[in-house]
């Protein structure tokens, strides 16, 4: 398989794709070793993760990892550093909190019987992952899965294979046994081999169509399935925003960070009519100052679009919107160059008949729509099949929280957006997914609870 640098479309490496037999052999080895791993003291399992988190941010390692990540995804080098640092911070949550949430606990004493709740690992699970944040989305899954005593067959995206290799290398260096964390190399076809195995859990990060395909394919196995899927995340500017410039800055960052290739990037903006012109002006000014180009150069805040095929999709969305009456305020085109670059694009006068307000754009294209009041904003925010995050800007906290309560999404942001914390559950509703990662719930996700009734005679 060719590994291509999206900022110049040159082949930077070639890797061998795993065969079905090789994947089956990985499973057999992992199954055997997991019986030992689950009985390894949790302190040892956590110590290995602690070492991993230290290793990836050691200066020399981090420089190399960031450079590899940028070379295959096209994201600005600084964002690659941010991602690696962010992954280490997320690991800290699991390092600090896992043991306490996995301790067996007496829930009730009934005469001479103790009722005890405890947690078993699931067994051998797979993590089929996405390319947009291979570290950040990976650690949500494989870190708690390993700490709770599972073996992991990890299939990174074909667009972040070299990073997947590095993650695997550093986990092994940190003390995770080779058969407990196995990397499976290849594209969706190789991913299908995993669906045929008798695994004990399927944990997927990626698009809704693939997530649906996986959930359907493994349904009859009756094992846990976790799906972290796409979003069409709305942001609403009320008429009670004191610092509109700051709000616009935050919205630009939430929309265009990683070129909009984030599951929780802002995908739709609604603005109260009293603030519409002011917000739009500030937002557009800031978008015009974004610099697109070679992601290894500091001055460029916008790198390449990772998948070449996505450029024509973004073009289609812009054409669809303008044909239906939208105003193209900034950008709108592929940049003529050897790499996959698209102009940061703002459309106004949009409505929900347009594809850019319905489909996951997953790129630097945003629509801004004027609304009359909170009621209309809430109706529009909920007019989607997705439900990952939603955000409201208002200096009136009570009003902001009241609006967020009525929006059907797994996460709500007030006066901020595009944030993930290890301490809070990460979960999507509707087409945004199934199950929970992060927070204590995201530790238990990788366990089977077991109740013991212990009677003394
Ligand atoms: P994708 O669905 O194309 O691929 C994801 C993974 O699935 C890849 O490893 C791919 O090789 C594999 N795959 C593809 N077909 C398969 C099949 N039939 N069987 C098994 N595996 C298969 O998604 P992507 O382009 O890598 O990622 C982008 C999507 O991921 C966006 O929709 C984004 O919003 C979503 N995402 C969600 C979250 C979240 O936390 N909710 C985080 C990151 C990305």
Image (cartoon, grey):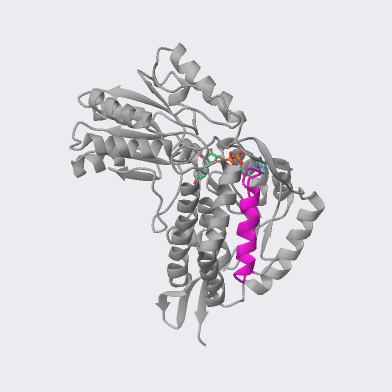
- Give the magenta range: 155-176
- In the image, is residue 156 part of the stretch drawn in magenta? yes
- Identify whether 179 is placed above or below 342: below
Question: Residue 252: x, y in percent?
Answer: 36, 35
- In the image, is residue 446 part of the stretch drawn in magenta? no
Q: Is residue 51 left or right of residue 384?
A: right
* Quarter of the image that includes the N terminus: top right
Counting the numbered discs, the total is 0
**Residue occupying the point 42% across, 57% down:** 422
**Residue occupying the point 57% across, 59% down:** 142
Question: Which residue occupies the foreground of this view, 87 or 78?
Answer: 78
Question: Residue 236: x, y in percent?
Answer: 30, 33
Question: Residue 357: x, y in percent?
Answer: 43, 25
Is residue 89 visible from the viewing direction of this image? yes
Is residue 408 visible from the viewing direction of this image? no
Assign ligand 1 to one image quadrant: top right
Question: Which residue occupies the foreground of this view, 361 or 328?
Answer: 328
Q: Which of the 4 image quadrants contains residue 56? A: bottom right
**Residue occupying the point 56% across, 38% down:** 207
Question: Residue 406: x, y in percent?
Answer: 31, 38
């Amino acid at each position: 398989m060719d590994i291509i640098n999206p900022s110049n479309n040159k082949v930077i490496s070639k890797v061998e794709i795993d065969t079905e037999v090789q994947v089956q052999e990985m499973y057999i080895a992992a199954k055997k070793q997991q019986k030992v791993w689950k009985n390894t003291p949790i302190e040892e399992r956590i110590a290995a993760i602690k070492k991993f988190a230290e290793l990836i941010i050691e200066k020399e390692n981090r420089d190399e990892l960031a450079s590899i990540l940028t070379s295959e995804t096209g994201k600005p080098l600084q964002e690659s550093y941010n991602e690696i640092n962010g992954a280490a911070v997320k690991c800290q949550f699991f390092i600090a909190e896992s043991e306490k949430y996995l301790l067996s606990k007496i829930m009730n004493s009934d005469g001479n019987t103790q009722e005890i709740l405890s947690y078993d690992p699931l067994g051998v699970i797979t993590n089929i992952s996405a390319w947009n944040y291979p570290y950040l989305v990976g650690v949500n899954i494989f870190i708690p899965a390993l700490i709770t005593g599972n073996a992991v067959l990890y299939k990174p995206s074909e667009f972040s294979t070299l990073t997947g290799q590095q993650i695997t290398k550093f986990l092994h260096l940190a003390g995770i046994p080779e058969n407990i964390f196995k990397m499976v190399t290849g594209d969706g076809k190789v991913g299908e081999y995993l669906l045929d195995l008798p695994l004990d859990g399927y944990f997927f990060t990626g698009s809704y169509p693939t997530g649906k395909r996986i959930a359907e394919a493994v349904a009859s196995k009756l094992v846990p399935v976790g799906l972290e899927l796409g979003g069409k995340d709305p942001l609403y500017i009320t008429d009670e925003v004191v610092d509109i410039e700051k709000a616009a800055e935050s919205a630009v960052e939430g929309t265009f960070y990683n070129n909009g290739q984030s599951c929780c990037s802002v995908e739709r903006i609604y603005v109260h009519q009293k603030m519409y012109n002011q917000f739009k002006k500030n937002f557009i000014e800031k978008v015009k100052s974004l610099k697109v180009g070679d992601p290894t150069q500091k001055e460029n805040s916008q790198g390449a679009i990772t998948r070449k095929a996505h450029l024509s999709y973004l073009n289609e969305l812009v054409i669809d919107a303008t044909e239906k009456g939208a105003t193209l305020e900034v950008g709108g085109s592929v940049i003529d160059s050897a790499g996959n670059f698209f102009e940061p694009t703002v459309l106004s006068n949009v409505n929900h008949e347009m594809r850019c307000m319905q489909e996951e754009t997953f790129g630097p294209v945003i629509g801004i729509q004027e609304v009359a009041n909170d009621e209309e904003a809430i109706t529009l925010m909920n007019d989607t099949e997705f439900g990952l995050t939603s955000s409201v800007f208002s200096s009136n906290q009570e009003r902001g929280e009241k609006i967020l309560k009525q929006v059907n999404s797994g996460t709500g942001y007030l006066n901020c957006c595009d944030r993930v914390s290890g301490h809070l559950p990460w979960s999507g509703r509707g087409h945004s997914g199934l199950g929970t990662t992060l927070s204590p719930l995201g530790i238990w996700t990788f366990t089977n609870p077991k109740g013991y009734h212990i009677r003394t005679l």
